[in-house]
């Protein structure tokens, strides 16, 4: 097996290569003055079992992913598996108004076109996996996040999901830690504003972890943390698979949360947990 590392997922590709004892292809990548991407693969991939690792976010990394697939295909590999640690646009999984782009479907069509199989991590809604025509596997960042939280000096005593949709994720983290879990009720007011309904929760004096698939603007986690602290929580940790941190969200999150952790699906300073092991199990 040969791993082709995309520039957005270099560290994860290296961790993965170590786990499965694969070699890493030599890629030359540059940006032209107008920001367009130049790519050249220096390793011969003819007849090889190739695994491309590249997060599909932000837009420029989607183009790089497609160019890498195109260049890989040219070598006529035995198989191309594309690992997409974070599948961008997956949250636009419905047409809310006539004429809207069904972005999740459009991106899936593009990223699978030249692939024999796809592996991705914690897609927002599992229903979009049906849009893949090639074999697709989804792995979860929740068990490794749970392992990290369990080993903290003060591990969480309860895991909270910010909404009912994330309840199963909280359950998976709580199971790894060996503690209880619950969920809040979130109502989205706009792209950036959310309201968390007050709820009686037994968090007084306790250490709480809020878990979610994505932290984007941070609105969800900030509101949930405020609610939990109002209910007397001693410490609130925030844990997510994909740390997007749109609009400089990280410092705002750091103001309210005691710790913020994410996985390496999007490489950030908070990426203290790797999903390499989960992906390796599928290869
Ligand atoms: C949505 O339901 C997701 O699970 C996340 O809760 C959401 O994407 C987080 O977005 P933000 O950080 O902008 O509140």
Image (tube, rainbow, N blue to C red):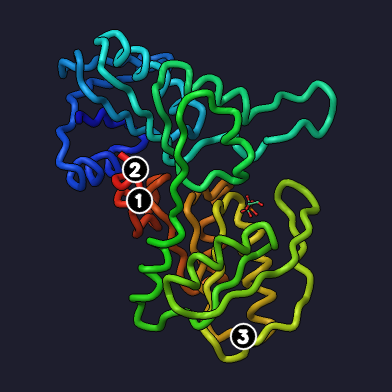
Position above or below: 37 against 183: above
Q: Nearer the viewer, mark 3 or mark 2?
A: 2
143 left or right, relative to 89: left
Which residue occupies the extreme right position in the image? 98
Pointer 3 residue Cβ closer than 8 Å to ligand 1: no
Residue 203's disc number = 3
Which is more foreground, mark 1 or mark 2?
2
Q: Residue at x 78, y 75 (%)?
A: 198
- Give the structural element (helix, strand or loop) at label 1: helix
Marks 3 and 1 sit apart, C-alpha to C-alpha, by 31 Å
Identify the residue shown where x is 80% and y is 53%: 189
Residue 153 x/y as whole percent? 35, 82
Nearer the observer: mark 3 or 1; the answer is: 1
Establish if 119 lies above or below 189. Answer: above
Q: Please report whichever mark, 3 or 2, sits nearer to the chain's N-terminal start.
A: 3
| Nearest the eye: 69 or 135 | 135
Count how many numbered circles sit on residues in the image. Answer: 3
Label 2 CB, ligand 1: below 8 Å? no
Q: Image point 26% across, 28% down: which residue?
A: 4
Residue 21 at least partly seen = yes
Residue position marked by numbered label 2 in the rendering = 282
Q: Is residue 157 left or right of residue 192?
A: left
Q: Image height check: is 254 above or below 205? A: above
Residue in front for this viewpoint, 222 or 159: 159
Q: Under tag 3, what secondary structure?
A: loop
The image position of residue 88, as x and y in percent, is 54, 35
Q: Which residue is mark 1?
A: 278
Crowd rating for badge 3 (residues with CA inside 10 Å; few <14, some 14–19, many 20+): many
> Which percent across, then down, holds residue 77?
25, 16
Secondary structure state at the residue bearing disc 2: helix
Q: Is residue 249 left or right of residue 13?
A: right
Q: CA distance from mark 3 to mark 2?
A: 37 Å
């Amino acid at each position: 097996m040969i791993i082709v590392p995309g520039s957005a997922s270099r560290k994860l590709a290296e961790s993965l290569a170590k786990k499965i004892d694969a070699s890493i292809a030599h890629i030359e990548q540059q940006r032209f003055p107008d920001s367009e991407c130049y790519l050249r693969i220096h390793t011969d991939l003819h007849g090889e079992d190739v695994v491309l690792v590249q997060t599909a976010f932000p837009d420029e990394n989607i183009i790089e992913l497609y160019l890498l697939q195109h260049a890989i295909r040219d070598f006529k590999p035995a198989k191309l598996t594309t690992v997409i640690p974070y599948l961008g646009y997956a949250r636009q999984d419905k047409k809310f108004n006539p004429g809207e782009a069904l972005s999740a479907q459009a991106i899936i069509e593009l990223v699978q076109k030249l692939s024999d199989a796809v592996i991705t991590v914690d897609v927002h809604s599992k229903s979009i996996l049906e849009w893949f025509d090639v074999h697709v596997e989804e792995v979860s960042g929740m068990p490794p996040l749970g392992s990290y939280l369990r080993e903290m000096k003060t591990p969480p005593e309860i895991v909270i999901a910010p909404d009912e949709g994330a309840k199963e994720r909280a359950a998976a983290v709580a199971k790894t830690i060996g503690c209880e879990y619950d969920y809040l009720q979130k109502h989205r007011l706009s792209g950036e504003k959310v309201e968390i309904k007050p709820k009686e929760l037994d968090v007084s004096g306790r250490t709480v972890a809020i878990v979610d698939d994505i932290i984007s603007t941070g609105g969800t986690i900030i509101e949930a943390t405020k609610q939990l602290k109002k209910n007397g929580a001693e410490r609130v940790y925030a844990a997510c698979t994909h740390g997007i941190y749109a609009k400089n969200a990280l410092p705002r999150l750091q103001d309210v949360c005691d710790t913020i952790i994410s996985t390496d699906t999007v490489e950030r300073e908070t990426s203290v947990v790797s999903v390499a092991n989960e992906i390796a199990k599928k290869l």
